[in-house]
Image: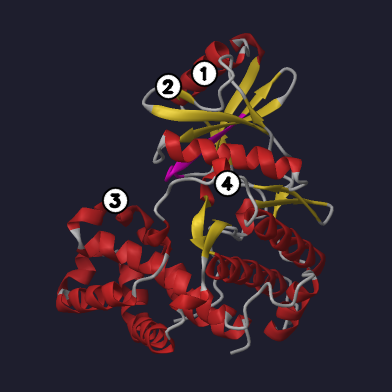
């Protein structure tokens, strides 16, 4: 199984396509009824990205400004409101995050068409690419962000179940046994490429799972408020500075050291791919050294960062597999396209963290 292949984070600019007539109508109605933006001032409505998973973003151009309208499809209001308050609090602490606009009722969330909606400031920039200067800056902002999150006000803490964010090796082993007992179904459950990657990498999955079990490192990660998905497309940069930390939905109670390690892996991988695309030979040890140079505390990134990152990769992988083999989690099958990325990541962590 080849590693360090291009993945969905390789594009440095967001993709836009014209919104459907139905979406354009709903967005126009939302802005007109709840945000006092007349329809005749809206010049275009574009959808950001290709697929709708947990949310959908629309870039709205008006005669006077640009806005991001976010449709939230898989969230509860009681979970979203603390996260939006957290965004505002982080902004006051100097973390670059988009401004959240209140509607005409002075609320951050609007219920319309069976969804919750919010309107955010549009911030121009490009996604994290992985140059040395960007890597240092991303490490600096990540460290500052996580330090602030440990002291966030209580009303900014969402009520999501934190246990969901921790890998359970016993449950995973049960799922491994179930998947192996139904091995003849893999070709039906997964498309050809995914089934091939899964079959080739299955011994690595079992090896990594056994590694986590025998090392008993679950106790290393205390739960605290974290950003659980700080990947290259959730950092906007401009002139080598972070212009915005995106995806407020990904703030939740989680094992902090694991989330820091997982974020470091995603950023280091992007930096490696940047060098590869320009035929620059970056030694993984040099990339890690560059990342660490952006930190003020030597203990911010755990010495077992590679192992901790694999814990999160395995958690995500087994969440998807459970969706394919267990009826009660069938909704997770929408992430099947990420299986090859996670399978490769299990090996890539060892190289990037110098194991």
The answer to which of marks 3 and 2 sits earlier in the sequence is 2
Q: Are marks 3 and 2 in contact (CB under 8 Å)?
A: no
Q: Are marks 3 and 1 in contact (CB under 8 Å)?
A: no
- Quadrant of the snapshot with the N terminus: bottom left
Q: Viewer-proximal residue, 5 or 168?
A: 168
Of helix, strand and loop, which one carries label 3?
helix
The answer to which of marks 4 and 1 sits earlier in the sequence is 1
Q: Which mark is residue 201?
A: none
In the rendered structure, the answer to whether residue 278 lies left or right of residue 51 reads right
**Residues in magenta?**
51-59
Q: Are marks 4 and 1 in contact (CB under 8 Å)?
A: no
Instruction: Read off the residue under disc 4.
Output: 247
The answer to which of marks 2 and 1 sits earlier in the sequence is 1
Q: Which mark is residue 331?
A: 3
Instruction: Read off the residue under disc 1.
Output: 30
Q: CA distance from mark 3 to mark 2?
A: 23 Å
Q: Is residue 212 visible?
A: yes
Instruction: Read off the residue under disc 2.
Output: 112
Where is residue 231 drawn, in percent x and y? 59, 59
- Label 1 Cα crowd, 10 Å radius (few <14 / some 14-19 / many 20+): many
């Amino acid at each position: 199984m080849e590693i360090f292949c291009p993945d969905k984070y390789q594009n440095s600019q967001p993709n836009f396509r014209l919104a459907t007539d139905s979406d354009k109508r709903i967005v126009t109605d939302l802005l007109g009824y709840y945000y006092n933006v007349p329809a005749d001032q809206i010049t275009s409505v574009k959808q950001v990205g290709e697929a709708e998973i947990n949310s959908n973003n629309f870039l709205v151009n008006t005669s006077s400004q640009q806005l991001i309208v976010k449709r939230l499809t898989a969230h509860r209001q009681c979970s979203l409101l603390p996260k939006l308050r957290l965004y505002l609090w982080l902004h006051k602490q100097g973390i670059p995050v988009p401004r959240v606009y209140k509607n005409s009722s002075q609320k951050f969330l609007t219920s319309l068409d069976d969804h919750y909606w919010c309107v955010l400031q549009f911030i121009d920039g490009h996604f994290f690419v992985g140059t040395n200067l960007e890597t240092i800056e991303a490490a600096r902002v990540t460290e500052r962000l996580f330090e602030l999150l440990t002291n966030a006000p209580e009303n900014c803490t969402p009520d999501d179940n934190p246990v969901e964010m921790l890998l359970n090796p016993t449950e995973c082993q049960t799922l491994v046994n179930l998947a192996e007992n139904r091995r003849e179904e893999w070709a039906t459950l997964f498309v050809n490429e995914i089934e091939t990657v899964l079959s080739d990498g299955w011994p690595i999955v079992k090896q990594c799972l056994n590694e986590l079990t025998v090392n008993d490192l679950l106790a290393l990660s205390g739960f605290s408020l974290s950003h659980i998905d700080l990947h290259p497309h959730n950092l906007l940069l401009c002139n080598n500075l972070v212009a915005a930390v995106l995806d407020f939905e990904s703030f939740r109670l989680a094992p902090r050291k694991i989330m820091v390690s997982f974020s470091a892996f995603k950023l280091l991988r992007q930096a490696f791919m940047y060098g590869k695309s320009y035929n620059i030979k970056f030694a993984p040890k040099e990339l890690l050294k560059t990342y660490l140079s952006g930190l003020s505390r030597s203990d911010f990134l755990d010495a077992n960062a590679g192992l901790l990152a694999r814990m999160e990769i395995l958690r995500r992988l087994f969440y998807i597999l459970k969706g394919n083999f267990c009826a009660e989690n069938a909704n997770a099958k929408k992430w099947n396209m990420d299986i090859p990325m996670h399978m490769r990541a299990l090996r890539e962590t060892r190289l990037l963290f110098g194991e």
